[in-house]
Amino acid sequence: MRLFLAAAAALIGLSGPALAQGALGANYNEHYEDVDYRELEKAGAKWVRIFLPMPQLDRQPAAEHGAVKTILEAKARGYKTILTLKYPYNRVPFPKAGGEEYQRQLARTDAVLPLVMGKVDILVIGNEPFIESRQQDWNPNFNAFYEGLAKRVIAYRNQHCGAQCATALYMGAMNKLNNPKWRTATTERWMAFVKETPELAGVTIHPHLGAIEQSKAFLDYVLPRMRPEQKFIVTEFSLIWWWQQNMKKPVAPAFADKYQAPRTAQNWQIIKAALETPFPKAQWDEYLKMSPWFENRKFYLANQMKIFRETGRLAVATYGFKQGSSMSAKWGPDKTPWLLNSVFAGRTIRPEADGTAAPNYMWFDQFKRLQNK
């Protein structure tokens, strides 16, 4: 019976989102308010990804939440869509599978499923479960909690959407697999559940790295632990930890001299100045171009997509598309510089004449070119 189900799942995988082999899309995380279809069109983007923090559904009906409304609007406009259901517990003890909080999460999930099942192209169960929990909570209860949520989603899909459902299901993202401490019995069980569950199209990874070579550890871990027809998606990826290593280092002297900044200024301070009074595009571009730590890695996006695509098993990857409010809030020397990843730099560069965000140095051009490969 299991062999039959696996074969059926393989056939289902030949249609719909699975055919988006190697696609590159726009990731907004929780910032649905930043979706601007003019910017998506300029970049040639065809995929949109948003995540939904599930506890927020206690404050408003699911149908009224901006993440749900925006992802459905994007779909109606012809975009392929990914909605991730986020269950955060990184600041509290992880709840018991089957307990009261688990039941609340089931209810929140039940409220979303009728709105999105059969409409969004990919639904991801769990955003970054391992980061959004405490390491001491990575135990069989952790697995049972997420497996129960996944089974609930699968049961709804089977009952209301059927074998040819347009929504593919993926389990949420594996983090920091380049660190052996993050490869545990809990991650092994996570992948075993993905492999043995025919209704799951695969797993998500989030390679936020200090060096592109570290992405190999993610692929080496997840690919052998899935069925051959299963794929992976990458809803977030970047060189964020390399950028952060350079924030407290002095600005490039050539930039400091040209724009009358102190040579002792650190990179985080230059970015702070751009956030307080956005630079002309030429000035921001020159800041990055004159910074060897950025310029020497300016082809990261294309190089990383090449690595993902060469596996033959990438369904879709989505890259940080726009500098969001959370990226600039409380900016300081220890702030994680996510805004350096963005395809559009609407907070560090003055807006375009039409009111859209300005394209970021290097990322915009690569993103657009990668749409045609």
Image (cartoon, helix red, strand yellow):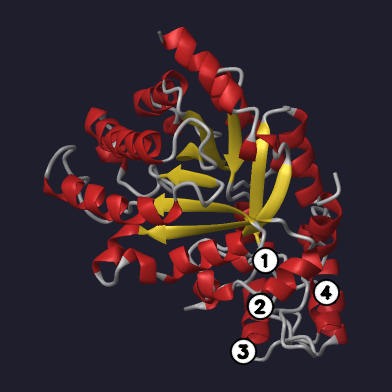
Spatial CA span between label 3 and label 1: 16 Å
- Whole-percent x and y of residue 119? 51, 52
For marks 1 and 4 on the same chain, the one whose residue lies earlier in the sequence:
4
Q: Which of marks 1 and 2 is in front?
A: 1
Q: Residues within 10 Å of mark 1 (few under 14, many from 20)?
A: many
Quadrant for the C terminus, please: top right
Q: In which quarter of the image is residue 247?
A: bottom right
SS for dot 4: helix
Q: Is residue 257 above or below residue 294?
A: below
Q: Are marks 1 and 2 in contact (CB under 8 Å)?
A: yes
Residue in the picture at 46% in, 22% down: 198
Spatial CA span between label 4 and label 2: 12 Å
- Whole-percent x and y of residue 176? 51, 39
Q: Which of 133 and 166 is in front in this view?
A: 166
Name the amino acid, label 4: Asp
Spatial CA span between label 3 and label 4: 17 Å
Q: Name the residue under label 1.
A: 340
For marks 1 and 2 on the same chain, the one whose residue lies earlier in the sequence:
2
Residue in the picture at 83% in, 78% down: 255
For residue 285, the mark is 4
Name the amino acid, label 3: Glu
Name the amino acid, label 2: Ile
- Whole-percent x and y of residue 309? 75, 35
Q: Mark 2 points at which residue?
A: 271
For marks 4 and 2 on the same chain, the one whose residue lies earlier in the sequence:
2
